[in-house]
Image (tube, grey):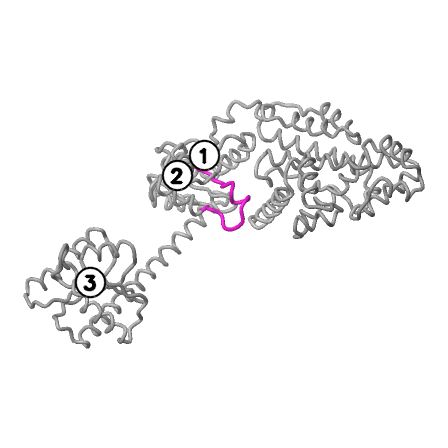
Amino acid sequence: MMNILIVDDQKHIRDGLQAMLHQFPLELNNTYCAASGMEALTLLRQHQFHIVITDIRMPDMDGLALMAQTKEEYMDVEFLIISGYSDFTYAQKAIGLGAKGYLLKPLKREDLQNSLEQVWKEIQIRQALTHNMQHVSRLAQETDRKELRMFMQGALSDDAWILQIEEQNDALWRYYRLALLREEACINQPGASSSHSMEAIAYRVFGREGCICLQHRPYLILAVDASIDPSVLPEALKEAKITAITAMTNPIQGLKELPDSYTQVLDLYRHSYLFPDQYSIFPAHIEHMEQQWQLPYEELYELFQSVGTENSGTITQGISALFHKKVLQRYPIRYTQQLCAATVQMMEEYERVIRPYMGEEKLDLESLRNLFDYQGMRDYIQALQQQQLRLNQFYYDYKCSYRHSQDLNEAIRFIHESYHKPLDLAMVSNHVSLNYAYFSNLFKKNIGKGFAEYLRDVRLDKARRLLAETDHKIVEVAAMVGYESYKSFTRAFRLVMQIQPTEYRQMMRQKAEHEAQYDNAIP
């Protein structure tokens, strides 16, 4: 479809030409008009035109000057010149500037139509040739990139292939770094990631000859010119308001070193979990880490001694101490991975004891097995604390089940069965036929918390499941777990969880989306 610009200082000529164009059997998209060369130049800078039909003599800027300026600015547009003068000099200058036709006023309909059809045919042929050449070039590049990616990831290649690829970009492969970029928002926000935007920024920083994209997913990996300051790329991303973690190796020489460099940059990226406040990770960050360590099993055992008590704060504080960043940063990331595995294993042992008594409830320990499924270390620790607190609650209920009388067990069953209804202490004490005051004291003594607090925790536990696993509105979830008002529900939820229900739902959905993205990214 053609976009045409008509340029003439006489309105009746502009209107006449526009009317004439719409009578032709042409593939017209848009037609614009300009009263001068300056106005036309502004439109050419704002829109994409295929053909300009322009008068020669106009105020401010004539047709020839307009053509010259578009050539200077490398605008891809064709010109048809119209003039009331048959001076050969004008025609000669117009043709010298690349005009596709020189038509004299008054215009003949047939001449204008034939000229437009001829120019449009030339444009289409040129576009088709360009497209074919670009397609062939792109296929060749994609083949080379695929082979490079496979070589980077460990596929064997012969020396002849390595030499051939090196010769295609000798300057880069002689002295390069590998850079891994992962945008934080690609997990936290729906929609496509900005890997292509980051790639474009990298090409702008290092130049077309100084940057090659080797991988897009699950994170962007680039080979970049090592002679350029490595801090320039993170700064450019920051200026573009893209929050991304950038891991970058030391300078490397020779394409043969690419597989080892790939291993190094992945290792650097994994270590970025130890530096949550750092968005650029270089080998200097991990060079002085201690290579010998022992896991703090005594601290772990002591922490798990608190499981099943009413002091949940001890558990969250204990996990925070075990996973304190100053401790983790002393050792390679393998220490943190082993600490995660040891903690999850101990949780499994405790869960195994009470599993027959948990009913449909269960812990989500599978989600804790891979640290790198999470956006960062903080997210993993938060998830670990939540599962540990759930284990504590389950274990506490389990221990209580052996201490409580039959009446108390029936009262707890009734609470779990009726939490979604209007429920108070009097109703539960009547259900088990116990005196109100006696039942209140018995409940608090054996359960470790008052009836209202226990009911709140039961309701909020059910609410967390509904928020994470259903699409019910918050106000609907509040009613489903027994809260009479949205306001009282959100106040209770925020008091216990330290976040709003909407934030909790968003966090759990982001976790599920990340898991799905990771699963899709696995070859």
- Tell me the kind of residue under disc 1: Met
Question: In the picture provided, is 454 more to the left or to the right than 406?
Answer: left
Which amino acid type corresponds to the residue marked 3 in the rendered image?
Answer: Val
Query: Label for residue 7?
Result: 3
Nearest the viewer among 449 and 283 is 449
Q: Residues within 10 Å of mark 1 (few under 14, many from 20)?
A: many
In the image, residue 41 sits, relative to residue 399, either above or below, namely below
Q: Quadrant of the N terminus?
A: bottom left
Residue 134's quadrant in the figure?
bottom left
Q: CA distance from mark 1 to mark 2?
A: 10 Å
Residue 382 placed where, x, y %?
64, 35
* Residue located 78% across and 36% down the image: 453
Horizontal arrangement in the rendering, residue 423 relative to residue 330 (left or right): right
Please report whichever mark, 3 or 2, sits nearer to the chain's N-terminal start. Answer: 3
The alpha-carbon separation of the residues under discs 3 and 1 comes to: 53 Å
Q: Is residue 190 magenta?
A: yes
Look at mark 2 in the image and give the residue it sits on: 224
Q: Which SS class for mark 2?
A: strand
Foreground pick, 190 / 412 = 412
Q: Are marks 1 and 2 in contact (CB under 8 Å)?
A: yes
Badge 2 density bin: few <14, some 14–19, many ≥20, Cα 10 Å: many
Labelled disc at residue 453: none
Residue shown at 72%/26% (left/top)? 314
Instruction: Tell me which segment is drawn in magenta.
Output: 178-195
Q: Judge depth for marks 3 and 1 and give the one in front.
A: 3
